Image (tube, rainbow, N blue to C red):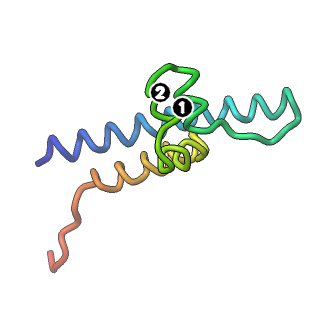
Amino acid sequence: MQFILHFLRLLGTLCLAIATVFAVGDIARYVADDIVRMATIAEIAQMTGIGAGLFAGGSATAGVVGGWPFALSVAVLGMVLTLLGRKRRRIGRT
């Protein structure tokens, strides 16, 4: 059980680090172009080539999810994984 909790915390931390990198990239793009625009999941998938065919002409659900901001989505996923992997608190008297 401890291994699973450690693994969830590790994945959560990695997701938060990836979200930070892409958020800094979005900020750099804002400074350079003077346009507030965040990279979407579909754009990142197309740029990296990972799952690009999924968002190309897929279902309506993939179209909606592909429009979400990547940095925010991965940050929320990282927070959820980190919270799931936290140590459980004992309730009761000590």
Q: Residue 7: x percent and y percent?
A: 24, 39
Q: Is residue 84 above or below residue 38?
A: below
Contact, mark 2 vs mark 1 (Cβ under 8 Å)? yes
Count all numbered tags in the image, as a single digit: 2
Distance between mark 2 and mark 1 Cα atoms: 5 Å
Q: Residue 86: x percent and y percent?
A: 28, 54
Q: In the rendering, which numbered label is found on residue 80? A: none
Residue extending furthest toward the left: 1
Secondary structure type for disc 1: helix
Q: Residue at x 76, y 29 (%)?
A: 28
Residue position for label 1: 56
Secondary structure type for disc 2: helix
Q: Residues within 10 Å of mark 1 (few under 14, many from 20)?
A: some
Comparing 57 with 13, the one in front is 57
Residue position for label 2: 53
Quarter placement of the C terminus = bottom left
Q: Is residue 5 above or below residue 88?
A: above
Left or right position of 50 against 28: left
Q: Residues within 10 Å of mark 2 (few under 14, many from 20)?
A: few
Q: Residue at x 38, y 42 (%)?
A: 12
Q: Residue 80: x percent and y percent?
A: 39, 54
Q: Residue at x 45, y 23 (%)?
A: 50
Comparing 57 with 26, the one in front is 57
Q: Amino acid at mark 2?
A: Gly
Q: Residue at x 49, y 26 (%)?
A: 52
Q: Amino acid at mark 1?
A: Ala
Q: Residue 17: x percent and y percent?
A: 49, 34
